[in-house]
Image (cartoon, coloured by chain):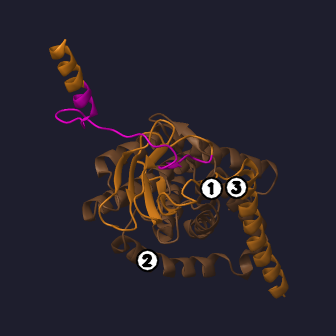
Amino acid sequence: MHVPDGFLSPVITRPAWGAAAPLWYWAARRNFGASATESLPILGSLTALAFVVQRLMIPVPGGTSAHLTGVAILAILYNPGVAFVCESLVLLLQALFFGAGGFTVLAVNALAMGLLGPGAAWLAYRALRGLSEPGAAFAGAYVGMQVATLAVALVLGLQHRLDPAYMPVPFEVTVAATMLPSLTVLGVVEGLFTVATMALLRRARLLHAR
Amino acid sequence: MRPARALLALALLAAALPASGHEVMHEVRRGRAVAVRAWFPGGESLAYVQAEVFSPADEKVPHWKGRTDRNGWLAFVPDVGGKWRVRIVDATGHGLDTTVDVAAPDLPGSGSSDPPAGATSLALRPVAGVAVIAAVFAFLYLRGRRRAP
C-alpha cells in the first residue's frame, strides 16, 4: 500500500507535508506528554507489532501482494492522533532502513495509512461498540483498511491525471488492483488481527476500561 | 560444366553479401546487458509489472520500456556509463524507483553485478526496526518517569 518515492510529484507531496507537519506536532504534544507515560510500553509494543505486520506480505489473486497496517487498533484503543504518530514512525523507519515507501512521500503515506484509515476505524468503532465490542472492532478495522486503501488509490489516480510520467497506471486500474484485495482479503484479516490483539491484551489485563 | 561453376560462384558470392529485404536481424551478446529483478520481501516476484529505464544521457525519454517477466526480471543494454534510473510500477502502487551504477560499456567492470541482500540481512532488518521502535519508546518512557513528581 505504500506509495514509493518517485511515484508522486512535488505538486502532491509538498502540500501533504504542509498538512501533515502541524498535525504531527499537535498529535505528539497531545498524546505523548507526561500523562501518557504509563501507556507508552503498550503503545511501543503495538507500534512494533504494526511494523512487523506491515513487513508480512499476503499473496492476493492477480499476482501481487498486500499487507496489513496494524494501526486501526491504536485508533480504537486510544485515538486517531496516536495512530497517526505511531504509523508515521513505522513509515519513517521503513523508508530509512528498507526503502519501502520513501521520505518525499512520507506525509502522503502517513495521512492515508496513519490518519484517514485509523480515523475511519475509530469512527466506525465508536458508532457500533454499543452493539458488540468485538464486532465493532472488526468493523472499524475493516472500514479503516478500505478508507486507507482508497485514499492511496485516489492519490495515485490524481497523480496519473496530473502527470502520467510519475504514475503511468490509470486510476481505473489502480483502484481495481488495490480495492479488490482490500475488500476481499485484507479488510477481513485486519479485522481479525485487531479483534485477536484486543482479546490478547484483555486476557493479559493490559486493556484498561475506557 | 561452365554454367554449373558460374552458378556455384554466384551462390557463394550471394551468401557472402549482407542480408537485406524483409529479414529481421538480431544480435545475441552475453554479459553486455544489465538485468534487474524486483520482488517482495516474502520472495514473491513483481511479475508482468510495468517498468521503465532512463539513461543518464536522457532523463525524460525512456531508454527502455516494457514489463518484467514472470520472475520479476527486466534487462536492458546500456550505451553509456553512469547512473541508470529503473522504475518498476505495480498497479497497486507498490514498486521501485532506483538507480543502477553502470560502468562504461565494453570496459573492465561492465560485467559486475550487485548481489541481492543475503538471507541473514533480510531477516535482521525487521529486528533492527523493532529495536529502534523499542529504543524510541523506552526513551520517552524514561523521560516521562524522570519528569514525574
Chain B appears in which tint?
orange
Query: Pointer 1 indicates a residue of which chain?
Result: A
Mark 3 or mark 1: whose residue is earlier in sequence: 3
- Tell me, yes or no, whether dots 3 and 1 are on the same chain: yes
The Cα atoms of the two marked residues, 2 and 3, are separated by: 27 Å
Could you classify mark 3 by the number of other residues whose Cα lies within 10 Å: few (under 14), some (14-19), or many (20 or more)?
Answer: some
**Label 2 CA crowd tier, 10 Å (few <14, some 14–19, many 20+):** some
Q: Observer-nearest residue: A33 or A153?
A: A153
Same subunit under labels 2 and 1?
A: yes
Is residue A131 visible in the rendered image? The answer is no
Is residue A188 found inside the magenta-colored segment of the image?
A: no
What's drawn in magenta, residue-wise? Answer: B12-41
Query: Could you tell me residue B81's position as x and y percent?
Result: 46, 65
Q: Which chain does tag 2 point to?
A: A
- Is B59 placed left or right of A206 in the picture? left
Q: Is residue B2 above or below residue B34?
A: above
